[in-house]
Amino acid sequence: MKLKQNFSLPKIYTANGNINKRWYVYFSFRNPETGKMKRMTPFYGIANKFKTKEERMEVLTVYRKSLIKLLKLGFNPFEDNTKLFEKLNNPKKNFNDQSKKKSEKNLEVSKPEPFDVADKVLIKDVLFMGLKLKEKVVKERTYRDYKININAFSKWLSVNHPNVQTIDHLKKAHFTGFLNSILEKSSARNRNNYRTNISSILQVLVDNDIIERNFLKSIPKLKTKPERHKRFSSETELKIFEHLKKVDPILLLFIKFYSYAFMRPQEVCRIRINDINIKEKTVSFIAKNGKLKTKIIPSILYDELPDLSDYHPENLLFTPNKIGGNWNAKELSRRDHFSKRFRKTVKEHFNLGIDYGLYSFRHTYITKLYRALNSQYSSFEAKSRLMSITGHESMAALEKYLRDIDADLPDDYSDMLKNK
């Protein structure tokens, strides 16, 4: 005779696509007392926190696959499933343990305890949920860093702890071991970046009641040596500009934009033709903090620009081969393109060390400007004028920046050291 199936395959209820209603995974299981199929309590998880159909389906699909796997392995909502979970989490138990389980099969089992499907979801699936929750609230580059770090942790865990697969068996020691492996291969700074990014994903999972604890909070940061970009000497700066004038005028104009307008490289990559007000000589852009900013284009920079009146307003100002054009590349790719271009065209040509980068130009010109202002005005007024140009949000932030780049040097104090 054909055996009756004890459970129906879990399905996803989508309320006919209505995201204002609750979506969930549901299934039926045969009641051992009545012999009839009984609908089990549906599982929602965090699916209904998402506001798009695609996101809800992705999360519920994870739940459905995990539930199907458990049912096929013997999960029974009417019985105690402790032995099943011990078997899943200890796959290397010997044959004697298996025989002992069989001999105890007829013993009376205890009443079933509450079971939460989320506790047994695979680690990689839970971390994926955290990424999805973060995707809509962070910038593209931040999300990319999160994804790279999470994938690296998942790969390390699968290699070094292959038996740790479900979220309830994840421990602090696993994160400590992973961070130590990053430290061995790279630096304390990189290790700290991994810690911060993965902690952010774990915290959003804690905030949404998916996991109970963020282990990274109890793992301290390591002390690091601050990264610094040296200023260029006047001689080196002149040589670089003369070299680029001959071999790469596009890169030269790119550099001058954040040298003279004190913008960051990624902000320069965002500029489109219609962001430049030709009459008022200003440029508008999305700053690092996400706010829309407007800065003047000083004459020393404005005179370098071509006539933009005939360019399409939606074209990017900077593309690989020309000023004003289409460039089908993401913002991060555009920024990386100019960084690599600078490294090949300038750093390798002039044999510059690791202490020099694109930001060296920003430091160089802010130092020049500050010293010029400081020679005409009091220290406070010089910094106030400088702050309106550089875009620092507070005097304290500007003063810290000036200290970090050693822009504010004292006058020669030799006379005070002489014996009189």
Image (tube, rainbow, N blue to C red):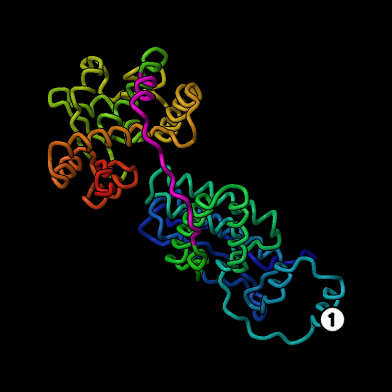
249 or 157: nearer the viewer: 249
Judged from this view, the residue extending furthest toward the front is 420
Q: Is residue 292 visible?
A: no
At a point 57% along the width and 49% down the height, the residue shown is: 151
Count of numbered circles in the view: 1
Q: Position of residue 328 (x, y in %)?
A: 42, 26
Judged from this view, the residue extending furthest toward the top is 246
Amino acid type at circle 1 is: Ser
Local secondary structure at mark 1: helix
The N terminus, quarter of image: bottom right
Write down the region rendered in magenta: 221-241
Q: Position of residue 125 (x, y in %)?
A: 56, 56
Q: Is residue 335 visible?
A: yes
Image: 248 above or below 50: above
At a point 20% along the width and 37% down the height, the residue shown is: 389
At a point 28% along the width and 36% down the height, the residue shown is: 367
Q: Position of residue 273 (x, y in %)?
A: 26, 24
Q: On the image, which quarter does residue 264 sit in?
A: top left
33 or 166: nearer the viewer: 166
393 or 377: nearer the viewer: 377
Q: Within 10 Å of the Cα at label 1, are there few (<14), some (14-19), or many (20+) other Cα atoms?
A: few
Residue occupied by mark 1:
103
At a point 31% along the width and 47% down the height, the residue shown is: 403
Please indicate whether residue 401 sits to the left or right of residue 162 in the image: left
Is 375 included in the stretch rendered in magenta? no
Q: Position of residue 391 (x, y in %)?
A: 23, 41
Please indicate whether residue 397 sits to the left or right of residue 200 in the image: left
Image: 241 above or below 226: above
175 or 420: nearer the viewer: 420
Q: Main secondary structure of the magenta part?
A: loop
